Every structure is written in structure tokens, then in C-alpha cells.
Image (cartoon, grey):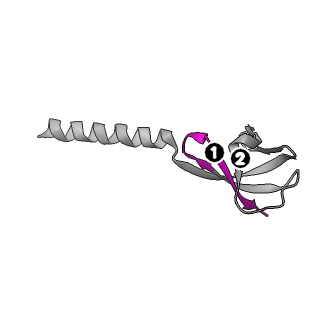
Amino acid sequence: MRNTNDFIQVIKKAAADVYAQMKPADICTGVVASADPLTVRLPSGLELPADLLVTVGSPELTAGASVAVLRQSGGRSYYILGVSG
């Protein structure tokens, strides 16, 4: 029975590792690098162009503004939730 339990633990760990690497969603802050065209720079240095950004509501976005950003699974879309601070 020990071998079965070991096997189950290995499968559980592998599944948890895959899930962690998928990063289903993440909230972070960014800085508006440019308002027109809209570009947001994340703390990692990654600059997000307008075609990856979705604004929620009608926030007033100006260059230098800090924004709260929600990254969708896979990093295909980033939602600007609003201006922070």
C-alpha cells in the first residue's frame, strides 16, 4: 500500500506544479507609460500595448499614473481595474 500512496502523492505534486505554472490570474500594479496609445509598464519591466489591455469603466489614465491590473490566465489580456493611489 505504501507504493500506491507514494504514487498518489507524486501525481498530486505534479498537478499542483502544473497549476502553479499556469498562473490562472494575478493582480499587480503598473504604471501608465503612455496614455495615447495606451501602454502600461509592469514592475517586471514588461510593457503592455493597448491591444492586450482592457479598461474597466472609464478611468482617467494619464502617463505616470499607477493602475491596478488583473492578468487573465495565460497573459492574453490585462484588465485595468482602476487608478490606484
In magenta segment, residue 31: no
Where in the figure is residue 45, as x and y percent of width and height?
75, 38
Q: Nearer the viewer, residue 5 or 58?
A: 58
Instruction: Please name the residue that numbered disc 1 is placed on.
Output: 77
Q: Is residue 4 left or right of residue 59?
A: left
Q: Quarter-wise, where is residue 2 in the image?
A: top left
Residue 40 appears left or right of 23 = right
- Number of numbered markers: 2
How far from the left and from the top, in percent, is residue 34? Answer: 86, 45
Find disc 2 in the rendering and name its residue.
Answer: 53
* N-term-proximal mark, 1 vs 2: 2
The percent position of residue 83, horizontal first and vertical second, equals 78, 61
The residue sitting at 73% across, 44% down in the picture is: 42
SS for callout 1: loop
Label of residue 13 in the image: none
6 or 66: nearer the eye? 66
Residue drawn where x is 66% and y is 48% of the image:
78
- Give the Cα distance between marks 1 and 2: 6 Å
Quarter containing the C terminus? bottom right
Looking at the image, the residue that sits furthest to the left is 1
Residue 47 on image: x %, y %:
76, 38
Any magenta on residue 82? yes
* Amino acid carrying mark 2 in the image: Leu
| Quadrant occupied by the N terminus | top left
Question: Viewer-proximal residue, 10 or 66?
Answer: 66
Q: Residue at x 19, y 41 (%)?
A: 5
Image position of 39 (left or right of 17): right
Dot 2: element: strand
- Neighbor class of circle 2 (other Cα within 10 Å; few <14, some 14-19, many 20+) is some
Question: The residue under label 1 is which amino acid type?
Answer: Ser
Badges 1 and 2: C-beta atoms under 8 Å apart?
Answer: yes
Residues drawn in magenta:
71-85
